[in-house]
Amino acid sequence: MHHFQCILQAQRCLGWGPLASVSWLLLRTCRAHSSFSSTTCPGPEGQQEDGVREDFSSRLATGPTFQHFLRSASVPQEKLASSDVVDPPPYLTVDELLGRQRKVYLETYGCQMNVNDTEIAWSILQKSGYLRTSNLQEADVILLVTCSIREKAEQTIWNRLHQLKALKTKRLRSRVPLKIGILGCMAERLKEEILNREKMVDILAGPDAYRDLPRLLTVAESGQQAANVLLSLDETYADVMPVQTSPSATSAFVSIMRGCDNMCSYCIVPFTRGRERSRPVASILEEVRKLSEQGLKEVTLLGQNVNSYRDNSEVQFNNAVSTNLSRGFSTNYKTKQGGLRFAHLLDQVSRIDPEMRIRFTSPHPKDFPDEVLQLIHERDNICKQIHLPAQSGSSRVLEAMRRGYSREAYVELIHHVRESIPGVSLSSDFIAGFCGETEDDHLQTVSLLREVQYNMGFLFAYSMRQLSKRSATELCGRNDGNLKVIFPDVEMEDATDSGLRVRAQPGDYVLVKITSASSQTLRGHVLCRTTLKDCSAHCSPE
Ligand code: 5AD
Ligand code: SF4
């Protein structure tokens, strides 16, 4: 697969591009965390009374004033952190942000994180005056909390959207227009592609944008599409107490951290959920205490890598002690230091209610400290169950996956875990068919399954997650104005050597005719390979 970075010389004439210098670039370095955020795009429908829309539009056009920024800046941190306080943007009033008893139907796909996120999103909407319904037919707002981990997960959502489209079209004119939102990982990964492909989608909210849901829905009410896919370095929704979906539930998920820094080469999560950050211990303990008071019998502490947990919010707890990695394990990021670690959190959580079972998922095998194993062994209420995703039994494939350990190091850890916690239940995830995996690699995975004798295994066929809308048959360069230009990788004339037909190579300049544009990228077809000098002679802007 070829991935190029090009430097194109733009001409400001007649939509004609440019010359390109093509250079090699690894795809992974192209992954952008967020390409747009908090934007509103003109939508397909104008479904509001004109008076309301005119007022809203004129306020939107006027935009925030200097006073608005001063006012926001002067709000004390504590106040900003509280989800009860609504600080409306300058083009909306507090009243307009209210749900006015609109009924929300939430549907969850993907992992336990998404189950928890659904409760967070609902908690925020409930405070804003929305009602919840479990009946799709009576919903005014339908929100899908989506997953991107494999192609199939996304296909399920596209199919669901087709069904919902019919529901939206059939909606009686006498009722409030139905609004549809995509929340979570798929909103983050595909961004405006969803809005362009499915015009009936009204709002997009990435995993770090749920506080913005009331505003997004209000904007959508005026007939516009609204999106916020901004990723955060510190959002943990620490102050948002999730609302239990079922009042008769006996178990609950408690999110202790968000995001992931591991960058395993097959995984989309660092790009959909952003950088790793931990929720402060105090707020986790408060939530678990409340759940215990409500009579819940089991909590599962959730995070992408729970044993990387590190609460740095209390400065006095910072120390210079760095992470002890399991023997034979390494990380893809710089060693982190200080803070309250997972062993401390687990200890505190397990002391809250001796009759409440504690589970956690998922730990990464790279840092499994003895303190955690010891705690699991000695506390009656911490379940003797560990999910230790191996992903492959072949050291060669593990290296290609950037897992930071070999098969031998993983097996050694398994022995250590079994010695430390006799009778422990072990489960794991495996991926089959990763890029470059051979029959022999696969047999090594099968042999690891036999060797470890897990209690449970989750086996997945590898699903390539495309991170760029550019296909393998396209090249990319930059024009003189530094805009990205994408064009098909085809043979072209060489303007400097008539009769010669060439394919663009890294470092070449090419002349491209621009045929379309999106907010950040130009697309076109390539005309010829050229030089800076020749191009300025033939394509001068005048
Ligand atoms: N294809 C297939 N499986 C994947 N997983 C993560 N990314 C992919 C992918 N691109 C699996 C891993 C992970 C589990 C949650 O999903 O096994 O542990
Ligand atoms: Fe959960 Fe990963 Fe799916 Fe996001 S992509 S919902 S983190 S499984």
Image (tube, rainbow, N blue to C red):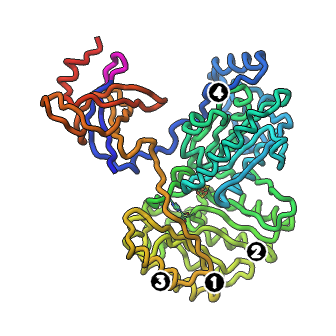
Task: Give the Cα distance between marks 1 and 2.
Answer: 15 Å
Q: Nearer the viewer, residue 128 or 477?
A: 477
- 353 up-or-down from 309: above or below: below
Amino acid of disc 2: Arg
Q: Nearer the viewer, residue 462 or 416?
A: 462
The residue beneath circle 3 is 412
Q: Position of residue 495 (x, y in %)?
A: 17, 28
Image quarter of residue 506: top left
Considering every residue shown, the one lying at the far top of the view is 542
- The residue tagged with tag 2: helix, strand or loop? strand
Image quarter of residue 369: bottom right
- The residue tagged with tag 1: helix, strand or loop? loop
**Quarter of the render that holds ligand 2:** bottom right
**Residue 486 located left or right of residue 104:** left
Q: Is residue 315 visible?
A: no
The residue shown at (74%, 44%) is 82
Q: Nearer the viewer, residue 371 or 304?
A: 304
Q: Position of residue 528 (x, y in %)?
A: 23, 29
- 309 up-or-down from 347: above or below: above
Residues shaded magenta:
9-16
The residue beneath circle 1 is 424
The residue beneath circle 2 is 357
